[in-house]
């Protein structure tokens, strides 16, 4: 079966073995995956949103965007600079 240019997502609640799936998929050469790239940032952002705290989301989102770009470049060997 040809899986070229296919995208898949695994989303779960805490303690549901998404880390296990990530660790298995990370061994595949052309699979980009992540599992909570920055757990402290993500947990605190969820806490703020859940509790309706008036925080600026931009810092949380910029951190997530940076980590996504780093993962992408790791897979596709982006030039640094």
Image (tube, helix red, strand yellow):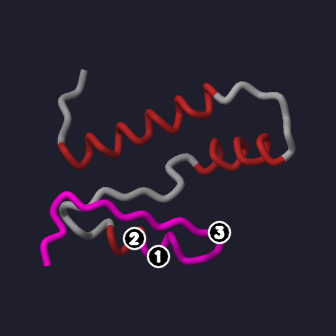
Q: Which residues are magenta?
A: 1-21
Q: Residues within 10 Å of mark 2 (few under 14, many from 20)?
A: some
For mark 1, what is the residue?
20
Q: CA distance from mark 2 to mark 3?
A: 17 Å
In this view, the residue in front, 49 or 15, is 49
Query: Residue 7: which quarter of the image?
Result: bottom left
Q: Which mark is residue 40?
A: none
- Element carrying mark 3: loop
Residue 22 location (% of width, % of height): 41, 68
Residue lying at 85% horizontally and 39% vertically, measured from the top left: 52
In this view, the residue in front, 41 or 49, is 49
Residue lying at 13% horizontally and 72% vertically, measured from the top left: 2
Q: Disc 1 vs disc 2: Cβ atoms closer than 8 Å?
A: yes
Q: Is residue 65 left or right of residue 73?
A: right
Quarter of the image for the C terminus: give it.
Answer: top left
Q: Is residue 64 magenta?
A: no
Check the image and report above or below for 32 versus 47: below
Residue lying at 23% horizontally and 49% vertically, measured from the top left: 75
For mark 2, what is the residue?
23
């Amino acid at each position: 079966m040809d899986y070229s240019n296919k995208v898949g997502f695994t989303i779960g609640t805490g303690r549901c073995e998404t880390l296990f799936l990530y660790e298995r998929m990370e061994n595949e050469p052309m699979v980009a995956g992540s599992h909570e790239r920055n757990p402290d940032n993500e947990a605190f952002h969820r806490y703020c949103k859940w509790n309706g705290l008036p925080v600026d989301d931009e810092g949380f989102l910029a951190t997530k965007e940076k980590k996504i770009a780093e993962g992408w470049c790791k897979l596709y060997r982006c030039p640094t600079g």
